[in-house]
Amino acid sequence: MNESLLPGFIIAIPILGATLPLALGLFRQQVGWAVAAVVLALETAIATVLAYFIYVDGQRVVHALGGENYGRREGAAGGYESESFAVGIELVADALSGAMILLIATVALLVLAFSRRSGPRGNAFYSGYLLLTGGLMGVAMTGDLFNLFVFLEIVGLATYAMVASGRHASAAVAALKYLIIGTAGASLYLVGVGYLYVQTGTLNMVDVSNSLAGNPEWIDGPLYGDPLTLGAFAFIAVGLATKAAIYPLHTWQPDAYAESPDSVTIYISALVSTLSAYALARITWNVFTPEFFAATANAEWMLNGLLVLAGLSVLVGSALAAMQRRVKRMFAYSSVAQFGLIVIAIGVAVHPEAGETATQFAVYGVVIHLLAHAIIKGGLFASAGAFRAGNHATTVSDYAGLAKRRPFLSAAVAVLGFGIIGVPPTVGFIGKWYIGVGAVQAGLWAVVFVIFASTLLTLVYIARILEKLYFDYQPEDAPPHAEASDAIATDGGNADETTQSGFLGTTPSLSVGMLAVVAIATLLSVVLGFMGSELTDAVQPIADAVIENSPEVGSND
Amino acid sequence: MIEILTSRYTYLLFAILLVIGLYMVVASSNLVKKVIGLNLFQTAIFLFFVTTAYVAESGGEQGMASIIPQDAQAYDPYASPLPHVIVLTAIVVGVALTAVALALIVRIYSEYGTLDESTLREVRADE
Amino acid sequence: MSEFLTVVPPSVVLLAAAFAVAFLPRLSGHVIGAASTLWLLAVALFAPEGTYWEIEFLGFAGAVFMEVDSLTQLMGIAAGLLATAAVVYAYSSDAPKVMTAFALSYVASTTGVIFSGDWLTLIVWWELMAVTSTLLVWHHGGDAIRAGYRYAIAHGIGGSLFLFAVIWHLAAGGGMTLAGGIEVGTVAPLSDLGIGADMPAILAALGIGVNCGFIGLHTWLPDTYPRPHIAASVFLSVFTTKTGAYVLLQAFPEGGMLLAYLGGAMAVYGVIFALLQHDMRALLSYHIMAQVGYMTAGIGLIAASGDIGGAGAVMHAFNNILFKALLFMAVGVVIYRTGIEDLYELGGLWRKMPLTAAAFALGALAITAVPPFNGFISKGMILDAADTGYFAGGNEIVYWMLFIGAIGTFLSFIKLGFYVFLHGEYDGMVKDATFGQSAAMFSVGAACLAVGIPGIWQTFAGYAVGEGLATGAIDLAVTDLDPYSVGHLMDAAILLTISVISFPVIRRLLYKIGHVSDMNVILNPATFYSGKAGVLAVTESFGAIDRAGIRFVRFCYWVGSNPVTAAQQGTGWLPGSVRPAFADEEHSPDGGEVSRLYLRAGIGMTVLLVGIVLTVLLALSL
């Protein structure tokens, strides 16, 4: 089989599959979960094969959509003999996107296991779920700036719908807030893309990057100093920072995370902002490249501005997290802080002050921390969901003394919490470590201070929750109905439809699937913590590309 | 300055429309008006793309619609088709977004009985 | 034959045992725990010296998970021996098995620190040590939780500083291996970093200083150690501080007179405060500070007198692990049987608890450096390093500070023993130590005695002066040491005489201070010393920093647990037009929290913010 078809399949299959639950729903009810499971299993298989080609064979798999007439061909453009711009849309699977597709496939499958019991049920939900997965895959794979906008909006649309699938109307309010702010962000991104298009005449990332560098013969020197280019970066950075929920553009995020159903929260917390940050990294590193930021003082100021925002994000996000009473909001604000760290590292990697090793470490930090945050935060939200399902606990004070009744879940929260603080040997430590070392190597001392402060601030709110769980036995905090009714719940039925309508709609009971998701996230966070060198080997091509200002993340052979 | 204003006025319009749209989103507390503002904001961006495609004059000829006959010269001044296609896609995305937004608003209205953001906040604070 | 000992690092074995203890039944779990600590002992005793498990770790080549040299052997022997006794002690003191599991994971991380052969591995285990010891404190619940929180914050800050130092050290091109310490003044690229070249060294000193209980950084010590389970105190008293001293030596293999003075000051400061305590475990905790002061002084004195200071410090760490744990065990038994922590409420216990009294006596004789106990050997080595007479170098001031410290040690242990075991009568029925407790205490007590006996101490001193230390300044051999010389014995006799004579004199005074002042006065050096002379101004400022630190941590904690009230109070002073709505909300009548905190920005506000941020970035770009 030709592996260059795989990047196409990996996007097309879930999007086509998204039609099935609705179509089959005409004939049978409750078919959505099964369809989603089959599609996502296939998806995971493809992602694995593709990852094999990327990481083991060391290939850069490119697929040009639209058949043989499209893609990159030798040709004459105007009076210039040259390799012309790529025609049509390219899908690129390289060391950077490979990590993302593996993450997306795994998380999608795991959350599916979680949602079996927790819901929301209904075929429409699973259509949206598959659409969202397809959109995320598209964001990861695409090598085209405008196509990235389209996939971002597909992701956005599906996410808004999924957030609104919470039973309570406050979910709709949160979704609308997310929609308006998210669309504003995406539109700003589109303006930036428009500027780049006007500047270079192409939308292909590699071509845009080459044109900005002034490589084609018909361009007189680099375009880095042009106000249009500088403005394009400003628009794109702000647009994607909004999507990634960087302070003070984060306000949609805690509402959206807190109001949506638990399974949706896990999914979007693990993936949606992650992919936006990925897009920011991809564009900053491979399209604009470090040379852009070194070329003019203005670009460096912009980058510093972005670093300031990200630093604020870390500090304020952590402080706000420590102030929350609802656990889901606490974790949501914690994500604001963590994405601040990631954006810091994205910026450090291309900072003119950063030498080769600093860039290398910062790149390691970004990719590993993206993965680490997705796994750990997904696991934490899954635990929060399981606690709500099993013990009706939603606020920090509800968690008092739950360690006695839920030793396994509590231990998982402890391990994952240490992961988010960055205690070795979890993967959270490795990510934070490389970000820290990168910043030290680059000599950005203010940034270094923020990173170290973030560890302590994270300790404050994680310690608060752990203390409640393990060392607080206030009987009045345990609601009388909290006796878990998970013993042998009647399976799969609609029992929950008839009974409680809790704070977020139905309150289903704890299931094996939920516990499995928590367990796998916990295990992954520790196991990956021991695989630091394997991870950095996988990431090495990206670091090389950034160091060499190359738009193409090459192979590692 | 005048020259730019007369020949490039569409860019100015883009900026004005964009800001009007943003202002609506910021200033109006009515949710539907916010969505209308968002639409205006996006429309401005579409117009920007369309504007970039237009070739005012090249080699003494006005830019033509990019319907290319078989015997066309290679470098006739055609308006670039690509931004048009892009805008078409973006419009579709915009319509879908509007639809979702309106659906959410319908649900919010049926639940809270108001479309005003500040009233909504008060209603929800009592929950 | 002994190669199989290095197949797995001992810390991994201990971690596995910790898991086993948590899940197995109590007895079999403790047996496995003790077996794992014996394994550690075996590794320390018999593993061939050398480097094992050299790997690439976190992007840095040359990480050494396990390195065996004479210093790690010495520390490993102490840790293995003591941990075994402590597991037995924990088992027979009704410690919950989860506590023992935490304790073993704590021993594992300590072992990891001791056996690491490079800075990176060391810092990883170091941070784990902070986490596991916090868990050990927390597990007891009650008072220990708040103390544990302060402990966690203190060690979080210390750990971050040390981590920062290590990163800086590595980033500046310093070597991965421990050899040479954090000695960055000579590393060329550092001057390019723009900040003082000694910055990593300062950070490392502060970071390690938290663990060692440097003056000003010590508050967690008497705050934490008296609170957890008695068996947990035994573990805690041994590992964190002594590992701190060991790492301090690794970081500053060439010493520094600043450290020597600091160590001397710690010895004095520690014993004075120890004398004033009436909580038994708090008294012992201040003694930890004093004893680590000796080690710090020894390390610092390397600069003046060469290897004898370092060797003395390591030897003293080794001995201190044994006798300090023994004292905590004995005091623990008293608390276990009587439930009383205040020494003035006890008395005459030697009739009821002869075994415990005997064990305590062994420990007290060892810590006060009476020959032929082990403390005599090592304290003598450090005093020799300070004495201008014995070896080249030395320092009068440090010597006298350490001398005063030694007198104070005598006094406070006479005080402890006198009030707990001798003075008056204890009415009521009290049983003596259980069999397991006695076995643990006497095996450690026997070790305290044995290590001091001529013919045996040479073996252990041999480790201390082995090639693990070798800074190359002076070639030190065991034969250079002569603890049982007339001069040394005379010193010990003088010390003992002064102490025995002065105790009745100051006894009344101590009793008065101990009773008149509450704990706050004692814990607040600033208040206590306010009338004293200029030298103590330093102490005062340290005290202020101390209180500010503790207050800040308390404040953070309060904000964390009452976020809404905090936000309300914090915004109350704002003018009405800007003040958020929640600032005006009433407290609920029962003094509870404000109902809801509305800090969320609306849609319009956020979009405005997006616009503002965009404008700022665009402005920067033009």
Image: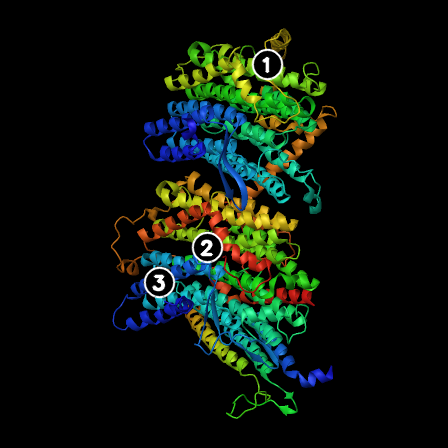
Name the residue at 38% across, 29% down: C33
Position of B11 with respect to A91 (left or right) is: right
Name the residue at 60% across, 72% down: A196
Position of C438 with respect to A462 (left or right) is: left
Res. C408 in view: no
Q: Residues within 10 Å of mark 3 (few under 14, many from 20)?
A: many
Contact (CB < 8 A) between labels 2 and 3? no
Residue to which mark 1 is pinned? C479
Q: Give the structural element (helix, strand or loop) at label 3.
A: helix
- Mark 3 or 1: in front is 1
Res. A155 in view: yes
Q: Is residue C448 above or below residue C48?
A: above
Camera-side residue: A191 or C512? A191
Q: Residues within 10 Å of mark 2 (few under 14, many from 20)?
A: many
Camera-side residue: C506 or A187? A187
Camera-side residue: B122 or C586? B122
Residue to which mark 3 is pinned? A40
Q: Is residue B39 above or below residue C544?
A: below
Q: Is residue A512 above or below residue A264?
A: above
The amino acid type of the residue labelled 2 equals: Ala
